[in-house]
Each structure stands twice: as C-alpha cells, then as structure tokens.
Image: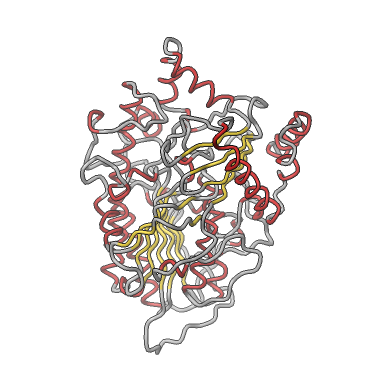
C-alpha cells in the first residue's frame, strides 16, 4: 500500500476501516541499526484501580493477562487520571493538559489551538491507530488516525467494544499495516469493558435484548468483596459480581491485543502502557474526585528498559504526564503549553523530585449538568473542594443508574447509616479531607479534625498554587470559599456555560 492514504473522518458507529492522508510526515529511515520504538496504549473503561489481581483483587485469576503484563514490567502504585469521566479523561491524556486548559471540560471538543499527541506523532512519521472510543478524541476534523475502528466494529453481539476476538483481529490488521508501510506506530486500544451495562445485568438485556456480548466466565455474588464506599446489601453485591464478570472480559481483550503484538514481531521494540480512564461506575467512584474516582492501575512494559516485576511505590504520576513521557521516550520535541511532565526517569528506575501530589478536577456530566470540583491527592492524604455542594440538584448519571444506587436509596429508608451515605452523595459538603492510607473508601471526613489542620492548610495552598499555574477559572472562587455569594455566582455562571 502506498503513502497516499484515503483521507477520512471516523465519527459514525459501524463505519468500515478507511485510511487518512498523511500530514507532512518526517519519514523514518528504513535502514536503521536498531528498529524505532513503537507505542501501545491500552485503556480500560470504568475499571477500579484495585479490581486487578496484582493490585489486590481477591477474586482468583480475575486478570491473568494484566497480572502477566505487570509481572514482566513496572507497576505504579500511586497513579491518577486528572478527571474521572471517559471523554475528558482521554482528551487530557492525549493533550498533556488539564481539562480546564485544553478546552474539553466535559463532552466537548478539544480547543482548536491545542495540539494532540497523535498529531505530533504523525508529523514525526508515526502510523497512528485507534480501536474504539474514537468519539472521545475530538475535534473530528483534526483526527490523525491512519486506522480508526469504531465502537460498532468492536461489537460482540450488539455490545460495543466488548469482543476480545475483534480486538485481536483489528490490532493484527493495524500491526500488519505498520509492517507493510515500514513505519513505527502508535496504537491506542480502548476497551469498553467494564463500562455499564455490566455483563449479565438487566441493563444489558434492556440495551441489547438477546444479542448479548459473549462471556466465558461469570463471577458469582458470593465471590466478591463489596467496595467499602458502598453498602454491603444483596443487590449491590449482585451488581458488583456483574461488574467483575465484565472485568474478566476486559482482561481477555487485553490478552487479545498483546497476543497480536507478540504475533507481529514488534513486541521487543514496543513500549506498552495500560491504565483505566476512571473508577467503577457506582456512587463515590466515577465522576467524582475521591480516591476510587481517579486512582488508576498504571502498568508499563518496555523491553530492555523497565525491570520485570518492579513496583514504584514512591512517585505520583497522572494522566497529563503521558504525552510528555512518550515524546521524550521517542526522542521527539516536546509541545509547548503542556501541564504535565515526563516521568521517563522512573522507567529507568531513577528518582524524580516533585512527584508527591496529583491534581484532579471535575466539571459536568453527560446531561450538561454542572458539578465542579477540585482535588489534590498525595500518597496518604487527599483534599477535595465541592463547589456545587448544596447548590444544585443531586448528581445523576450512569453511576446512579443501576442496582447499587437504587438499592442504597431503598435501604436508606430503614437504615440511617445508608441514608446518610445517600444524602452525602446527593448533596455533598463544601470541603472534604481524608486519610486515604487508612481510609481508602473515604468514609471519615477529617476536614474539621484539629490534628489535621496544618496539613489541610498546606494542601489548600498546594492546590491554589497549581490553580494559579494553570490559570484555573475556579481560582477566584476557591480563594473565597467562605463567601456564599461568591459560590452562588460561580455556580450560576458554571451552569449557564454547561448548558451551551
């Protein structure tokens, strides 16, 4: 196949594979002494950080492929995405910028002036491929994908992005294209599991009738541990088991992609990274700023560079660091205006100063309802400000659409402890501070605890400095948290913007 590829956009579900024309690539010399480095990024959808065996999941053999990847590479114990919702998370990762600096705070396009990683790599002569979630990397007119497989093309039955066989098929097709064109590649493989509807759920049946995605293993309710931030009641336990059935299938898709990489002969010169876009789609996880919202499993395998079975339990990395790290690893010039910074030294088992905290945020949900939050997470402690607390309707989205939230609402009618959790989720409080080392589920808000006031003051200061550095539009309001009128005005303005 020649280099005059067919120009395309890929915004319709179920459209066939088409190829895009090149954008001023800098050709890679064919006869190099060592082959150029390739990059494979695999993301999971709504996978909680501790749902993987190597990250502490108690279900036997729940993620054998991810565990094998971790055993052969480097596992980060303190990694976060910068926003816990699918599209803005991926757009933050692929721009190296926070949502409030790349223009994509919710389900919005990236600002036209903001460069993306895929653009920069294509200009440098890389072949770009994306499997699924193609709608989550807008704007469409600036796509730089040489191979774009839509969600519908990754279907198993009607269930989009839930077929390990198709992830293998399309990964193999892209890798063959790279081999035929003799180009280094960047492949972003976005797995839709374990996003709702969970495998075996009533939601799944309602969504796809009898044309359901296949499963090869069903997790039983008696085999799961219910997360501590939820109520351990029958329907919650049932839904968590459905979630873990989807987790297992997610891992099968990871294995299918890695199998295609092994078959291609590229494995020895490919840098592989795996992470999740946010936590599980239940209350107090996805679409919030809690530990279980933004903390992600982050596994790196780089043959000859990362030490097999190594664990980084010291440094914090976050999604905005992905783009600068990849550019440095590929020896490609950095892009101006990036909020993150490369953690390449950590992949060489070196130390790196200034990696004590990660900064996270939230803006709005699918229905363009506004729930602005900011947070700072350390290895042990976390501080969250909820600008929307008691100033808008309760948050409703896919996290509240299934069995878990409905069961907690019902149980709360007779159980005061569960009722208080539902009330907190619905209305929140302005500030929260948690000892996440001892309370990872965020059950004990220490914001008024005398012992922690110095640390709270320090973390407020650190958050303020990062907001200043990145010209966060919420900064002025953050500096007036004791002014109800300022909070009211901010929320009114944010809700007006969200509806546009």
Q: Is residue 215 above or below residue 142?
A: above
> In this orientation, which residue lies closer to the viewer: 9 or 238?
238
Residue 424 appears at what percent x and percent y? Answer: 54, 24
For image coordinates 34% across by 65% down, the residue present is 301
Left or right, 56 with reference to 114:
left
User: Which quadrant of the view contains residue 404?
Assistant: top left
Q: At 56% across and 62% down in the image, what residue appears? A: 143
Quadrant of the image for the C terminus?
A: top right
Q: How is the image coloured?
A: secondary structure
Residue 357 lies, with reference to residue 234, above or below; the image says below
* Residue found at the very far top of the displayed protein: 414
- The residue sitting at 48% across, 33% down in the picture is 284
Q: Nearer the viewer, residue 366 or 19?
A: 366
Q: Residue furthest front?
A: 451
Name the quarter where the N terminus is drawn: bottom left
Q: How many numbered markers are drawn?
A: 0
Tell me residue 108's x, y (percent).
62, 47
Name the spot of residue 310 as percent of width and height, x first: 32, 62
Residue appearing at x 36%, y 35% in the figure: 198
- Residue 438 x, y percent position in the rendering: 41, 38
């Amino acid at each position: 196949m020649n280099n005059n590829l067919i120009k395309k956009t890929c915004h319709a579900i179920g459209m066939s594979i088409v190829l895009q024309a090149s954008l001023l690539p800098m050709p890679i010399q064919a006869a190099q002494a060592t082959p150029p480095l390739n990059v494979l990024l695999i993301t999971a959808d709504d996978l909680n950080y501790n749902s993987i065996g190597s990250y502490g999941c108690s279900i036997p053999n729940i993620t054998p492929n991810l565990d094998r990847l971790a055993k052969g590479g480097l596992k980060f114990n303190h990694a976060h995405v910068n926003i816990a919702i699918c599209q803005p998370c991926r757009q933050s990762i692929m721009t190296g910028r926070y949502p409030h600096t790349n223009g994509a705070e919710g389900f919005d396009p990236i600002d036209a002036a903001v460069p993306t990683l895929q653009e920069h790599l294509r200009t440098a002569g890389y072949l770009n491929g994306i499997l699924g979630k193609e709608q989550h990397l807008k704007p469409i007119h600036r796509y730089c994908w040489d191979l774009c497989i839509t969600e519908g093309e990754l279907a198993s039955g009607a269930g989009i992005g839930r077929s390990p066989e198709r992830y293998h098929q399309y990964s193999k097709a892209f890798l063959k294209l790279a081999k035929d064109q003799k180009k280094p590649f960047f492949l972003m493989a976005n797995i839709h599991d374990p996003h709702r509807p969970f495998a075996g759920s009533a939601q799944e049946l309602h969504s796809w009738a009898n044309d359901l995605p296949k499963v090869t293993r069903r997790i039983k309710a008696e085999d799961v541990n219910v997360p501590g931030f939820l109520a351990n009641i029958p329907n919650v336990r049932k839904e968590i088991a459905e979630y873990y059935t989807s987790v297992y299938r997610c891992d099968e898709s990871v294995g299918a992609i890695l199998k295609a990489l092994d078959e291609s002969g590229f494995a020895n010169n490919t840098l592989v990274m795996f992470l999740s876009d946010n936590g599980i789609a239940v209350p107090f996880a996805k679409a919030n700023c809690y530990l279980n919202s933004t903390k992600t499993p982050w596994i790196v395998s780089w043959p000859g560079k990362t030490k097999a079975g190594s664990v980084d339990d010291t440094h914090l990395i976050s999604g905005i660091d992905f783009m600068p790290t990849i550019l440095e690893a590929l020896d490609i010039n950095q892009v101006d205006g990036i909020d993150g910074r490369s953690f390449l030294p950590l992949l060489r088992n070196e130390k790196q100063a200034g990696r004590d905290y990660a900064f996270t945020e939230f803006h709005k949900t699918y229905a363009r309802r506004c729930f602005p939050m900011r947070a700072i997470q350390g290895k042990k402690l976390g501080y969250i400000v909820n600008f929307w607390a008691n100033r808008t309707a309760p948050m409703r989205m896919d996290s509240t659409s299934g069995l878990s939230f409905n069961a907690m609402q019902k149980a709360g009618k007779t159980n005061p402890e569960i009722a208080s959790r539902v009330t907190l989720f619905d209305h929140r409080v302005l500030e929260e501070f948690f000892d996440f080392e001892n309370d990872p589920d965020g059950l004990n808000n220490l914001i008024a605890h005398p012992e922690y006031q110095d640390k709270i003051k320090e973390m407020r200061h650190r958050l303020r400095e990062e907001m200043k550095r990145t010209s966060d539009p919420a900064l002025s309001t953050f500096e007036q948290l004791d002014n109800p009128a300022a909070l009211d005005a901010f929320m009114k303005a944010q809700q007006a913007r969200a509806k546009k």
